[in-house]
Amino acid sequence: MNTEIQPDRRSIVRDAVGIGVATGAYGLSFGAISVASGLSMLQTCALSLLLFSGGSQFALVGVLGAGGSAVAAAGTAVLLGSRNALYGLRLAPLLRVRGLKRATAAQLVIDESTAMAVGRDSPRAARLGFWSTGLSVFVLWNLGTLLGGLGAQSLSNPEVLGLDAAVPAAFLALLAPRMRARQPWVVALAAAAVALVAVPFVPAGVPVLLAAATAALLVLRGRGDGGRNDSDSTDSTDAAVEAK
C-alpha cells in the first residue's frame, strides 16, 4: 500500500511546486506593475501578503494606475475575490480545520489550491493537494512580488518597458483558457460593452467595477438557468420512465 501512496504523494507535491513556480512568474509581473503604477514597495508586498489574490491585485493596481479612486479599486478587488468564499464552502468539509489552522487555510483558498484539492480519491490526498499548492503559491507569489518590485524600483523610468500594458496582458493570459465555450464570450462582451458605455460618464476605475458587477450577475443568472434546465430535464426523464 505504501508503495502506491508514496508515488501519488510525490506527484501531488511535484505538481504543486510546478504551479507555484508558474504563479511566481506572475508575481514578478505584479510587483513590477504595482511599483510602476505608483505604489510603494511596502504597499506592493502588503497586497501580496494580505490580499493574496492575483486577479484582485492586478485589478486594484490597474484601477489605481488609471487614476481611479481607492473605493472603486477596492470594490473591483472584492468582486473579483468573492469567488474564494464559494471555494471555502466547498473545501470546508474536506479540510476540517479549526482555530489558527482554519485562519491559515482561509488565506490559502485560491483557484490553484482549490483545483488541486477537489476531485481527489481521498480526503488525505485532497488536504495534501490543498496545503502543498497553497503554500507553494503563497511563498513564490510573494517572492516574485518582491523581486519584481525591486526590479521596477531600480529603473529610472519603468514605463519605457511597456509595463502599463502588462495589466491587460496579464488579464488576457488568465482569461484565455476559460474562453472555450459560448457563455464566457457572452459575459466578456457584455461586461466590455458596459465598461465602454460608462467611460465618458463616470470617474476612472468605476467602469471596471461596473463591468465586474455585470459579469458576476450574468454568471449567477446563467448558473440559475442551468439549474432549472437540469431540473426540467430530470423531471421530463422521470415522467418518461413512469409512462413506460
Image (cartoon, rainbow, N blue to C red):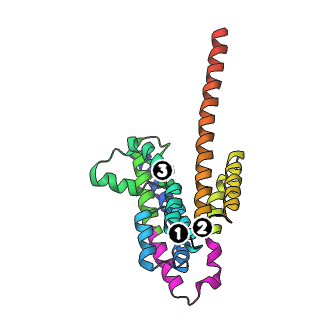
- Check disc 1 and give the amino acid type: Ser
The 10 Å Cα crowd at callout 1, few under 14, some 14 to 19, many 20 or more, is some
Would you name the residue on which mark 2 appears? 203
Dot 2: element: loop
Give residue 207's position: percent from left, percent from top.
62, 62
Residue 1 seen by the camera = no
Residue 166 magenta = yes
Task: State whether residue 137 is above or below residue 214.
Answer: below
Cα distance, mark 3 to mark 1? Answer: 32 Å
Region rendered in magenta? 142-167
Task: From the viewer's side, name the closer residue of 54 and 63.
Answer: 63
Quadrant in the picture for the C terminus: top right
User: Do the residues under discs 2 and 1 have CB atoms within 8 angstroms?
Assistant: yes
Which residue in the structure is indicated by mark 1? 69
Q: Between disc 2 and disc 1, whose residue precedes? A: 1
Q: Earlier in the sequence, mark 3 or mark 1?
A: 1
What residue sits right under mark 3 in the picture? 114
Indicate whether 110 appears above or below 125: below
Q: On the image, which quarter does residue 65 sit in?
A: bottom right
Q: Is residue 181 magenta?
A: no
Residue 58 rendering spot, x and y as whole percentages: 55, 67
User: Is 219 on the left-hand or right-hand side of 45?
Assistant: right
